[in-house]
Image (tube, rainbow, N blue to C red):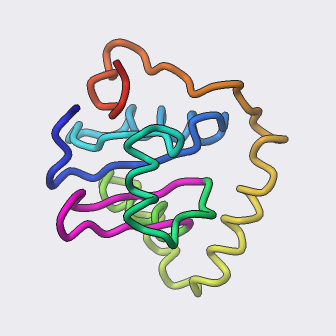
Amino acid sequence: MVETTNVPVLLYDGVCGFCNKTVQMVLDHDRRGTMRFAALQSDYGRAVVERHPELRDVDTVVLVENPGEGERVFIRSDAALRVAAYLGGWWKVFLAGRVVPKFLRDWVYNLIARYRYRLFGKYDSCMLPPPEVRSRFLDVA
């Protein structure tokens, strides 16, 4: 198991085409290279959901900060904004979205999430990450 203390972990729907493309985008732009990834369907993802019962019905992106003791989870638009802040650079432009009320941000997020399989496809199983980034994925042999 890869060490996750003090590094953010992005949980995602491993069978969702949009979610997989989002993970690839984060990998491509993560200059620090510290963010880790795990599918919600993985042992790691299920363990996080077990620790946070409010995540039981969440099937999209979850950002876990300070995994383990003192762990905080962010979902929907809050997770997306935290990822933008983590990436830094021009991605911080998206932080202007914080001025939009959370219920509106989450409404748009949920609208996209509702149709993500139709728009971006769905896999039969979680995709295997390429060898050059495999070490950043939790629960991948």
Q: Position of residue 18 (x, y in %)?
A: 65, 40
Q: Position of residue 17 (x, y in %)?
A: 67, 34
Does residue 76 lie above or below 23 as drawn?
below
In what quadrant of the picture does the N terminus appear? top left
Does residue 112 lie above or below 133 as drawn?
below
Does residue 80 lie above or below 16 as drawn?
below
> What segment carries the magenta color?
60-76
Residue at the spot x=36%, y=31% of the render?
A: 139
The answer to if 64 sits in the magenta stretch is yes
Q: Is residue 109 left or right of residue 120?
A: left
In what quadrant of the picture does the C terminus appear? top left
Q: Nearer the viewer, residue 132 or 46?
A: 46
In the displayed orientation, state which residue is furthest to the right: 118
Q: In this view, does 140 lie to the left or right of 18?
A: left
Residue at the spot x=48%, y=79% of the render?
A: 98
Residue at the spot x=37%, y=24% of the render?
A: 140
Residue at the spot x=37%, y=43% of the render?
A: 44
The answer to if 13 sits in the magenta stretch is no
Q: Where is residue 25 in the image (x, y as percent from the top left)?
A: 47, 37
Q: Is residue 76 left or right of residue 112?
A: left
